[in-house]
Image: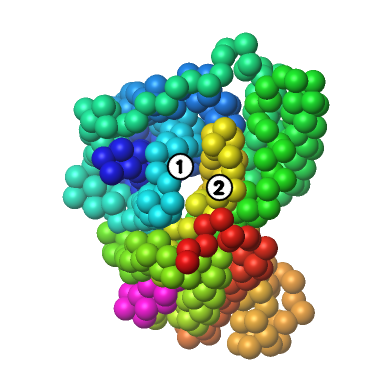
Amino acid sequence: MDSLLLVCFASFIIALDTTFMNVSISSVVADLNTDVSTIQSISSFYTLITAAFMLLSTKLQDIVGKKKLFLIGAALYGVGTLTAALSQNTLMLFAGWAVLEGLGGALMTPIAVSIISGTYHGDKRTFALAIESALVAIAAAIGPLFGGVVTTYFTWRLGFAVEFVIVLIIFALQSKIPYFEATGSKSELDITGAIVSFVGLVLFVIGILMLTDDTTFSISAMIVGLIVLAVFALFEIKRKRKGNVPLLDVELLKDRNLRVGTAIRLLVNLAMGGTLFAVSVYLQSVLALSAFNTGLTLLPMTLGLLLFAVAAPRLSAKLNHKLLMSIGCIVTIIGCLILSKQFTMDTTMLDLMPGMFVLGAGLGFVMALGVDIALSNISEEGQNNASGIVTTGQTLGQSMGTAIIGVILILGAIGGINDAVDTYAPEYSSDDAYHQGVYDYFQSIGSINDVKAENSTVQSIVNTIVKDSMEFVMYVTAALMAAIFVLTLRLTDKKIKKP
């Protein structure tokens, strides 16, 4: 159990890093004398580097050894967090946060899952993977609260310092991590495949991250990235047929559980990441809550996720993974529908908490059991590769969440403008210039308190835009969970179904 805690520590800080700085950006801008777009770009590069090196790290664990590569990743991550904490300018922050932490995260993430699946079996593996998955989700969910506390009462640098301390704990207790023999050699490393997969993933992730800035370039980059990844897959298939060791064994994807489980992992992280982003923007921009109160409002989601994720392995002994994940999808959809009616200019923190708890509870079932069922039919020698496939899907889902929901918010706002003008200013329903003026005003609002100083018609229009845009986000999230529900029906549970 000590080894489980240590690898979970690694997964926890990597996931925490993706969200806790979101509420600290203004403080970082002031401290480093820079601008918001620069800090957001550094954050995007962290995601980009983590995703781009994931497949390579999956193969390196065969050559270097799981434990050794995990500790190398932890060392890189630790140096990165210390560099970020001591940053005196944006170049130091970029080197520490984006480059070193990104590389460290790419090395540790697939190995964490691989170590767990190689150490535990049966019910213990189900429980261990559930805990790891739950902690990843919880870290992302409590990131705003954690960031709000350290930024409000101390400094944003403390967030990175806490991560550095956790890395030191990992090294202090490294003897608890089981040792695995390296099963490959340097001559087996597929350099060409590594380069092609790197280019494909970089293009695809850049496309995702640019979705709200330049839609044409974004879509083009994603399409080219997918084409390059398809070329990579064909290259890997030919390489294996020639008797060479591939960087990624594409034939593993013939297993339905791995294929479907990876898709579920991607979509559920997309849904959760996007929802957290949209609700956080609403809480801070509309309700004008502090970073701390924003995190506090999201806390019921975290509690629901934790409680149901911990309960999932026990319940799977009586039911099965497939059924529980299906139930989780339905519960999450109910949570989305509850929340869809709650977002207005006059909503309170208490109004949102019940829906957030239900949403988190459903996600707890889906996220806790998703990795276990995805790897359930994979042989011992294929576990490393399969872990890399699943974690790459997870990372891509996290990358896509914010960008895609950002577009959904814009579309929802446009729909809200049409609805509001038709209701409160029908004489301008066909006036495109008026619609554009309303949109420009909505975009320029510095605080919702500015709107409350306007006349009642303006307040009603803005309230309708807010309500419709957030309602649209919740409906899209519910649709994603409905798609995941359909995918769960394609899973097979024969080998892990309990008597």
Cα–Cα gap, marks 1 and 2: 8 Å
Outermost residue toward the left in this view: 153
Q: Marks 1 and 2: CB-CB under 8 Å? A: yes
At a point 52% along the width and 73% down the height, the residue shown is: 327
Which residues, given as a range, are shown in magenta? Answer: 348-360
Tag 1 residue? 117
The picture quadrant where one finds residue 293 is bottom left
423 lies above or below 13: below
- The location of residue 329, given as percent across then percent down, is 54, 70
Q: At label 2, which amino acid type do we have?
A: Leu
Q: How many marks?
A: 2
Which quadrant holds the N terminus?
Answer: top left
Outermost residue toward the front in this view: 499
Tag of residue 468 = none
Outermost residue toward the top in this view: 187
Would you say 88 lies left or right of 403 here? left
- The location of residue 99, given as percent across then percent down, is 46, 26
Q: Residues within 10 Å of mark 1 (few under 14, many from 20)?
A: many
At a point 77% along the width and 42% down the height, the residue shown is: 223
Residue 336 falls inside the magenta stretch: no
What secondary structure is the stretch in magenta mostly built from? helix
Q: At label 1, which amino acid type do we have?
A: Ser
At a point 63% along the width and 60% down the height, the residue shown is: 492
2 lies above or below 146: above
| 487, 341: nearer the viewer | 487
Residue 352 falls inside the magenta stretch: yes
At a point 69% along the width and 44% down the height, the residue shown is: 253
Would you say 248 lies left or right of 454 here? right
- The location of residue 241, given as percent across then percent down, is 79, 26
- The location of residue 143, given as percent across then percent down, is 35, 52
Tag 2 residue? 375
